[in-house]
Image (cartoon, grey):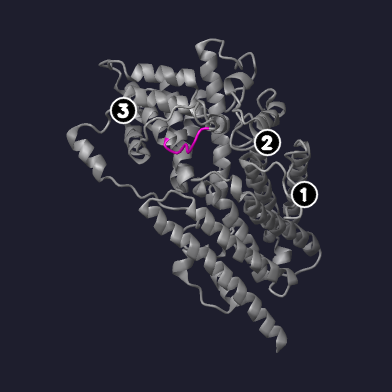
Amino acid sequence: MSVVSQLTGIPFLLPEGQEWVQSRTGQKLDVEKLSPTRPPWEKQRALNTCAMYSDLQTGAIFDLPDRTVVELHLERYRLSLIQSIFPIVDKELFQETIDAVYQQPQPDSCYVESSLRACIFAFLAFSSLIMEPCHEGIAPQPPPVDGEKYFMKAHLLIPQILQGTPTLDGVQAIASLSLNQALYELFTGSLQSANYFGTLVARMLFMLGAHTSLPDETEYPKTTAGDHRSRVQRQLRIIFWLCFTVEKDVCIRIGQPQMFTDENCDLTLPTGYVEQLYEDIKVHHFAKEIPRTEITGYPLFPVDLRLSIIKSRAYSTLYSFKALKKTDAEILKDIRELDDELERWRMSIPLEWRPTLSFSHETPDPNVSMHSVMLRLNYHLCMTIIHQASSRCKSWAKGQGGVMDGVSSSLALSVEASRSTLLYIEAAEHVLVDGIFWTLIFYPMSALLAIFCNILQNPSDPQATKDVRLLRTATGMMERLFSRQPFAVAEIVHIKLVADFVSELYRLATCAIEKAWNERSR
């Protein structure tokens, strides 16, 4: 597994990895199916610019939609669970943005107005991704908007915004814009673009000092009371945590360095965050009520912030440029420490939500929900990326003794976490929200690759046959997830590539087992 691309876990991206796969399977690789230029969970954004050029010629490219449309989308966002998971705007502050942008523009305010318009466009692009509110009949049903069009409108305004003198309102606007764009790209699978926009918003947050501001209740009051500045500062800190969380996923998926690190950021958790988090999840899960950020203080965020911090430390400790120079002993020491930290996190979770060390159909989750899905998948992902790093140990790669037992047990934990990922997604299929295929795809794909590499490494192991069956089951599960995704034509083409990729993994894994069996029978 030392020939596997670190973090992404894809052996086909490295020439020596391709040679290794061929030597273990006896098969020539189908390069087209295995798509060696990028990971299978990434897709390039296909933009239809013809309509945009038409708008440009008529001078209507930056025209605002009807104000009522924007306010209806804001109200639906406020009443949906999305506002607690992705708190991209504060309702009152964004209402001020709406008020300002729909007033007559001032002659000297072109840069400010660009920021305001970009925020409106970016919010509508993000709102187009909201599938449904939690309470049908309560939230308004705004007219659908063309998310792609508003994405492009906001995108085209970025150069003009960057030329203006940074102000609190202007920088907050572009931070919100960049975050919206990053989340939009993450949802739709265009991870390189998400990385670019995430870098931009990080720099803006650094300029505002949001990476070092302590979430003190006095400075950031929980209620809607308090002056305007306090509300702005609190929202900036919320945006910081949201960007921090999203960045960890993007960096892990594409293998790029982090912007937000322990060395440069104050990672003190918001006051009362841990105690509130699982109470809010319980309220939503059992009472089907939506946690109110204005009342409870801090949102849920996409995943427990403590788990995002562990991801950040795992990346820095095990996968940074500096980490790649560590000795075997240093790598194993770091793995043990991170594993201990992850276990302390797991044991701190209330019992009804606590992930088990591994998952099987014999130990079902009685509280399965989208919350538990994201919690479990991120826990198993952390286990995988922490223990997968042991494959870099030189003594193990060379087959030397000493640390081999420790490395083998660490790799076994990584593969078991990958099995648990696939089994849990299969068990939780019925609670997965439609239309989030590109958000979830990384988890099963990285798990499939880890299991595939383990089969090739140990094709004679009795577990290999069971794992091949799991790959086959996962292939069917992925096909069912495909069918629940609203497709554009370009997405259908890419999904076909993903399906071919998964099928080829299954074929090669089967060939590896057959090759090992034939060699043993001679």
As measured in the structure, the alpha-carbon distance from the residue carrying label 3 to the one carrying label 2 is 39 Å
Q: Which residue is mark 2?
A: 306
Q: Is residue 467 above or below residue 78?
A: below
Crowd tier of the residue under label 2, counting other residues whose Cα lies within 10 Å: few below 14, some 14–19, many 20 or above: some
As measured in the structure, the alpha-carbon distance from the residue carrying label 1 to the one carrying label 2 is 18 Å
- Mark 1: which amino acid? Arg
Q: Which residue is mark 3?
A: 65
Q: Is residue 285 left or right of residue 258?
A: right
Q: Is residue 256 left or right of residue 364?
A: left
Span colored in magenta: 128-133
Q: Earlier in the sequence, mark 1 or mark 2?
A: 2
Q: Earlier in the sequence, mark 1 or mark 3?
A: 3
Q: Which residue is mark 1?
A: 336
Q: Main secondary structure of the magenta part?
A: loop
Tell me the tag on residue 266.
Answer: none
Where residue 298 sits, quadrant-wise, is top right
Q: Secondary structure at mark 3?
A: loop
As measured in the structure, the alpha-carbon distance from the residue carrying label 1 to the one carrying label 3 is 54 Å
Measuring 47% from the left and 34% from the top, which residue is drawn there? 179
Where residue 58 sits, quadrant-wise, is top left
- Mark 3: which amino acid? Pro
Q: Nearer the viewer, mark 1 or mark 3?
A: 3
